[in-house]
Amino acid sequence: MLCAKKGLSKANGYNRSNNYKIHSEVHLRGLTMSRSVIMSQVRSKQVNNNGLRVFMGTFTGGVNVHKALAETAVSRQITTATFELLGGLHEATFTAYDFEKQKRLEPIVLKRQLEIVSGHGTISLLDKEPHIHIHMSVSFRDKAYPHGIGMVGGHIAQATAFAVEFTLTAYDGEPMHRELHKLTGLKLWQ
């Protein structure tokens, strides 16, 4: 667990170069864990040792955004990527995950004109197939909200494009794979 602090001494557990204090214990789901246990939960690897490829394009005509990104990944031989999305949607399904119960909550489906305020995500492999992970914030016109505009955001389970522009950065090299992570119950990167 990190907390931002400036001008404090290293003797008090503060690291001057990074300006944060590392606490020796963290409480997670009722368990107390030492810093070494937490660091064992941090995983990363370099994925772009062969370079980057950048693609820009559009999805229109009511296509499913997840399927269109998966088809793009297959046709361009992309196994690991990040992407940004802008534009309009006909429909979006938002889901959330209950951390304590480790289960998906009931989806929220919006069927109306939606403007993507911010859209981003990742492509990795799950069971050797492209897995598309998208988060979005969308706005919509509604007189019930202040200034006539509502906004919602979160994990997207499904989205139908009116006109969506994307920028996709593919990381050539070792692919990222997803697998079940026992502590969280989610399928996370290995």
Image (spheres, rainbow, N blue to C red):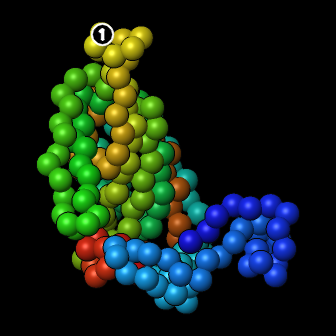
Most extreme residue toward the front is: 12
Most extreme residue toward the left is: 106
Dividing the picture into quarters, in which one does residue 77 lie?
bottom left
> Is residue 32 something one can see in this rendering?
yes
Label 1 sits on residue: 143
Q: In which quarter of the image is the N terminus?
A: bottom right
> Is residue 57 something one can see in this rendering?
no
Image coordinates of residue 160 in percent, x first then y, are 24, 36
Dot 1 amino acid type: Lys
Q: In screen coordinates, is 70 left or right of 32?
A: left
Q: Quadrant of the C terminus?
A: bottom left
Rendered view: 78 above or below 127: above
SS for callout 1:
loop
Please state which of residues 84 and 23 is positioned toward the viewer in this rendering.
Answer: 23
Dividing the picture into quarters, in which one does residue 74 lie?
bottom left
Number of marks = 1
Q: In screen coordinates, is 121 left or right of 178?
A: right
Q: In screen coordinates, is 102 left or right of 29?
A: left
Residue drawn at (28%, 71%), measured in percent from left and top? 186
Residue drawn at (59%, 83%), measured in percent from left and top? 24
Rendered view: 30 above or below 58: below
Residue drawn at (80%, 61%), measured in percent from left and top? 6
Please state which of residues 75 and 101 is positioned toward the viewer in this rendering.
Answer: 101
Specify few, some or many for label 1: CA neighbours under 10 Å numbering under 14, 14-19, or 20 or more. few
Image coordinates of residue 69 in percent, x first then y, are 34, 51
Image coordinates of residue 121 in percent, x first then y, are 42, 53
Please state which of residues 45 and 187 is positioned toward the viewer in this rendering.
Answer: 187
Rendered view: 52 above or below 144: below
Residue drawn at (37%, 81%), measured in percent from left and top? 31
